[in-house]
Amino acid sequence: IIREILIEDNVDESKKIKALRKKFLGRPAINVLYLILTDKCNFRCKYCFFEGGFSEDSIFSEMNKEIAKRSIDLYQKNLGIALEKGLVAPKEANVILYGGEPLLNMETMRFAVEYIAKLKEKNLLPKELSININTNGSLLTKDICRFLRKYKIENDISIDGPAEIHDQCRFYYGRKGTFKDVIRGFYLSKKEG
């Protein structure tokens, strides 16, 4: 099989390559920060790349406030350089709260979000910076949903389809299905805005 790129005869390929190189390789700019708040999870999904690598007797870890602050400070510094050089736009700035299940480390999550808000108030981070949380949804409460709404955090909940499909893949220890808890969290999140 021959795989080639077809271009017009009169196109200077080297100019195109230089332009692409400048556009994509000439801008090592950081605009996204993943805060992996914990590697623990209350689910044991059979395809999880995170939990699937751990044995049942593994010792899990949690990010503490000091590491969260240092991470955010480093992100703020590098994002500031990228913004100053015009390598990224303020609306491209994004922090993703991740895990395991990030809601298992609410203390550090609250600290990180409130710290980011303070940096935004001081114009040290762009007002347009968005925050997302990737959660399985089972631990959502009214208070957590209100916190997410207050800080305009996009809540991304993982659902694998109807209960009979979802529960085949996403379950607790002992293989008890999680759909009812996830869908409860989904509707609570929706209700709380």
Image (cartoon, helix red, strand yellow):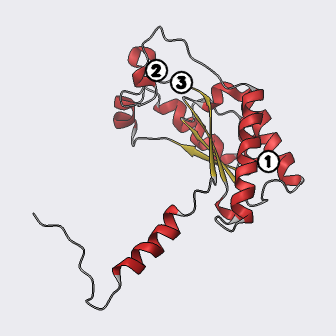
Q: Is residue 173 above or below residue 153?
A: above
Camera-side residue of 189 and 27:
27
In the image, what residue occupies the spot 70% across and 54% down?
Answer: 79
In the image, what residue occupies the spot 64% across and 54% down?
Answer: 31
Q: Position of residue 108 (x, y in %)?
A: 74, 29
**Dot label at residue 88:** none
Q: Residue furthest right?
A: 122
**Dot label at residue 41:** 3
Which residue is tagged 1? Answer: 150
- Disc 2 residue type (three-letter): Tyr
- Disc 1 residue type (three-letter): Lys
Q: Is residue 23 above or below residue 72?
A: below
Mark 2 lies on a secondary structure that is loop
Q: Position of residue 51 (x, y in %)?
A: 45, 24
Q: Residue furthest front?
A: 14
Q: Position of residue 161 (x, y in %)?
A: 39, 43
In the image, what residue occupies the spot 40% across and 24% down?
Answer: 52
Q: Quadrant of residue 97?
A: top right
Q: Is residue 72 visible?
A: yes
Q: Is residue 129 visible?
A: no
Cα distance, mark 2 to mark 3? 9 Å
| Number of residue marks | 3
- Disc 3 residue type (three-letter): Cys
Which residue is tagged 2? Answer: 172
In the image, what residue occupies the spot 27% across and 83% down?
Answer: 7
First in sequence: mark 2 or mark 3?
3
